[in-house]
Amino acid sequence: MGRLFAVNLEGKIYTCRHCRTHLALSEDVISKSFHCRHGKAYLFNKVVNVTEGELEERLMMTGMHVVADIFCVGCGSIVGWKYETAHEKNQKYKEGKSVLERIKVLGPDGNNHWINHEAHIGGSD
């Protein structure tokens, strides 16, 4: 395996709960009204430092979609999914967007789901 090159974001960031790898900026949140098996999830315009799993047809609350699970490049944990294709016309806005599950990330909600990059001190748990 080669060396891991991760993108470091600045500002209010969402990170992997397990390894603190940067995943997204709070300004890239499109919607906070998504849900997953484990609770709330957020739709993002852009995420970084993830790899995509196999594409599969999945029946979601809003209909059938072609999606791929996304995994943190730092630790391999599943952090959400990416929409590739939406079959319903009113769901097309999701195509190419990613969902991060709140339980899997640290991010801006005041409940230990966010960190401010300037205040973060390096190190691992």
Image (cartoon, helix red, strand yellow):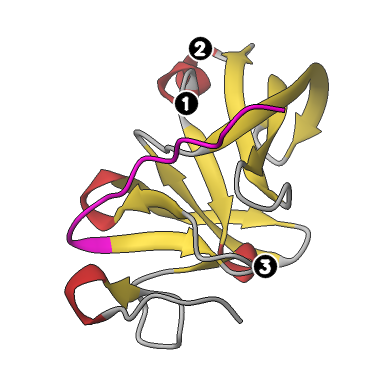
Does 8 lie within the magenta span? yes
81 or 58, which is in the foreground? 81
Residue 98 in picture, x, y percent from top left: 51, 35
- Res. 64 in view: no
Looking at the image, which residue is at 27% across and 57% down? 26
Q: Amino acid type of disc 2?
A: Lys
Residue designated by label 1 = 94
Q: Quadrant of residue 112?
A: bottom left
Provide the secondary structure element on which disc 3 rests: strand
Q: Which of marks 2 and 1 is nearer the N terminus?
A: 2
Callout 2: few (<14), some (14-19), or many (20+) C-alpha neighbours within 10 Å?
Answer: few
In the rendered image, the vertical position of residue 2 relative to residue 28, given as above or below: above
Q: Amino acid type of disc 1?
A: Lys
In the rendered image, the vertical position of residue 119 relative to residue 101, given as above or below: below
Disc on res. 89: 2
Q: Amino acid type of disc 3?
A: Gly
